Amino acid sequence: MSVVWLIAPDSTVQSNSNVVTALWIAALLIAVGTFVGRRMLLRWENLRDIATSKGIVGVYANLQKSAIFLSAAAELIVIIGVVIVFLSGQRDEIFRAGIIALVVFVINFPRKSVWNKIASSLGNV
């Protein structure tokens, strides 16, 4: 983020571009979508079905795939922030996008204890 802040053009003119607004809306929708996606990807019924068909290894693979997908969404928010900075000329926009992406990443961060708890619960099924 600091590299983008250093190389981005600084503009004193306020940009009222519809494109910038649309990109911010897209970033916020992606952020909300990650929380909904996490709930859908980690539904108990889906994990139970995976455990019965593929075993615990399949459950861990599914959890890993979900974590990668949700982390990629956080990275996409940062990329949208970089585009917004270059379109608007406002350097501080990258920090806003970074904070949104950081919140998305921290909330969706995979925790080993939770994964082990899920796997041990599904091992009994």
Image (cartoon, rainbow, N blue to C red):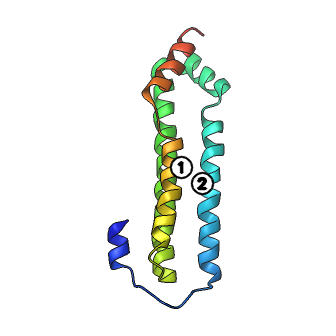
Q: Secondary structure at mark 2?
A: helix
Q: Are marks 2 and 1 in contact (CB under 8 Å)?
A: yes
Is disc 1 placed on a helix, strand or loop? helix
Please rate how many residues cluster around mark 1, counting C-alpha atoms within 10 Å: few if below 14, some from 14 to 19, many from 20. many
Q: Is residue 76 visible?
A: no
Residue 123, how many percent across, how many down?
53, 11
Residue 41 drawn above or below residue 81:
above
Q: Position of residue 116 (x, y in %)?
A: 47, 20
Q: Nearer the viewer, residue 3 or 46?
A: 3
- Tag 1 residue: 104
Query: Quarter holding the C terminus?
Result: top right
Residue at the image position 43 percent from the left and 27 percent from the top: 112
State the residue lying farthest toward the bottom: 13
Label 2 sits on residue? 31
User: How many badges with numbers are in the image?
Assistant: 2
Which badge, 2 or 1, is on the more N-terminal residue?
Answer: 2
Say left or right for 4 vs 125: left
**Separation of disc 2 and disc 1 at Cα?**
6 Å
Q: Is residue 50 above or below residue 18?
A: above
Q: Nearer the viewer, residue 22 or 66?
A: 22
Q: Position of residue 40 (x, y in %)?
A: 65, 37
Residue at the far top in the pictured view:
124
Would residue 78 be found to the left or right of residue 37 on screen? left
Q: Residue at x 53, y 57 (%)?
A: 100
Around disc 2, counting alpha carbons within 10 Å, would you say few (fewer than 14), some (14 to 19), or many (20 or more)? Answer: many
